[in-house]
Image (tube, coloured by chain):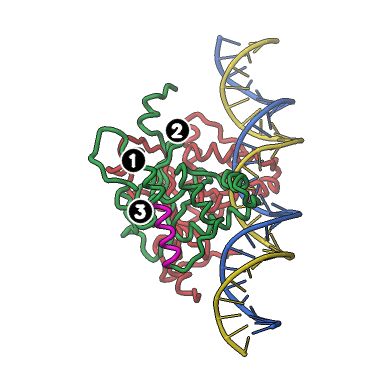
Chain colours: A green, B red, C yellow, D blue
Amino acid sequence: MKKKKKNENSSKIFEYHDHGACFGDAITQIEDYFIQKKLQLTPLRRKVFEILIEDHKPLGAYDILDKLGEAGFSSSPPIAYRVLDFLIEHGFVHKVQGLNAFIACSNPKHSHFPTFVICRKCEKVAEVSEEKSGLNLPSPRITNFKIEKTTIELTGICSTCENAEIR
Amino acid sequence: MKKKKKNENSSKIFEYHDHGACFGDAITQIEDYFIQKKLQLTPLRRKVFEILIEDHKPLGAYDILDKLGEAGFSSSPPIAYRVLDFLIEHGFVHKVQGLNAFIACSNPKHSHFPTFVICRKCEKVAEVSEEKSGLNLPSPRITNFKIEKTTIELTGICSTCENAEIR
DNA sequence: GTTGATGTGTTATGTTATAACATGTAATGA
DNA sequence: TCATTACATGTTATAACATAACACATCAAC
């Protein structure tokens, strides 16, 4: 998981974490959650989540379907979409609208209103939890409206790519 | 279809404006902008913008294509997408990602980083400029990243619909 | 009058997502 | 025990959204 680190002079939001630990934690978290909520963490659901958490970057539904196929599961579209919807509903997966892609949640315990920061060049995506993004919700100025879901995506260029860029 | 009604005691962000004036202002604004930037406000571009500003709600690309067809323009997909891209680039149209739809900008002079508030029930969409949304950008906490574009969409239920809802 | 920039037209195809219906399995309880 | 229900998955077909690639026209500039 995200280890709070002393701030360096480098790109904080894209910095690396201990992915082995992240993977294990995530599996444990989802198992616990499913038990607690009496939900079925079926082989298919588990596999979809593992696919997403494995390299921890956004994948299209059809990419996921391909990987499901390779793993011996059915790979017709509804299979993926149904499971993704289910995992999204329970906060373990987010959809990145700007990429029509899906990504494992970095911290299902906390990030109900995550912000995604997307580099248009290297296509890295960072999930920033609401406490850290400075984009706090709900806004005091939006009244008479109950926010149920947010899509907050910041697209641009990370400093690494910007330094490399000519154009 | 959805019939727009006079505002009652409801939701501030969805409140009505003088749409006749809005329409005229918008056309004037786009004309001025195009002259100033030496761009061509061709019949096709003007028509697409008029279609969008006419009822001022999000329309899918294929809805726009249908209306173009009715108006005697070509209605093959690239026609719409090209013009929409162009208008988006110049800030007169936004894409609402959550609906795969396009909407005329409420205020091209100011809203470079707009927030959209979307009622999932009545499907009304309000554009809130960054000054008013409380979601000010760029965040002081996101460093080493240059934000070029934002997608901020708040989906939920407006008070009018909530009051009417059972479930 | 050729060149290059721009705008539109057209065909074909690619990509993303859902509807509708069928099957399997396990728990519930009459 | 057997119907009922709830849930998960499988399958076919199609809908909805978007772009690639190429053709043609106009017009200003050289």
The residue depicted at 60 percent of the width and 50 percent of the height is: B60
Magenta stretch, main secondary structure class: helix
Q: Position of residue A151 (x, y in %)?
A: 44, 52
Q: Which segment is the magenta one?
A: A25-36
Identify residue type, mark 3.
Ser
Q: Quadrant of residue D30?
A: top right
Q: Which residue is mark 1?
A: A13
Identify residue type, mark 1.
Ile
| Pointers 3 and 2 within a single chain | no
Disc number for residue B133: 3
Chain of the residue that carries numbered disc 3 in the rendered image = B
Disc number for residue A122: 2
| Pointers 1 and 2 within a single chain | yes
Give the left or right position of residue A84, taking residue A129 as reference.
right
Label 2's element?
loop
Marks 1 and 2 close (CB-CB < 8 Å): no
The residue depicted at 50 percent of the width and 29 percent of the height is: B38
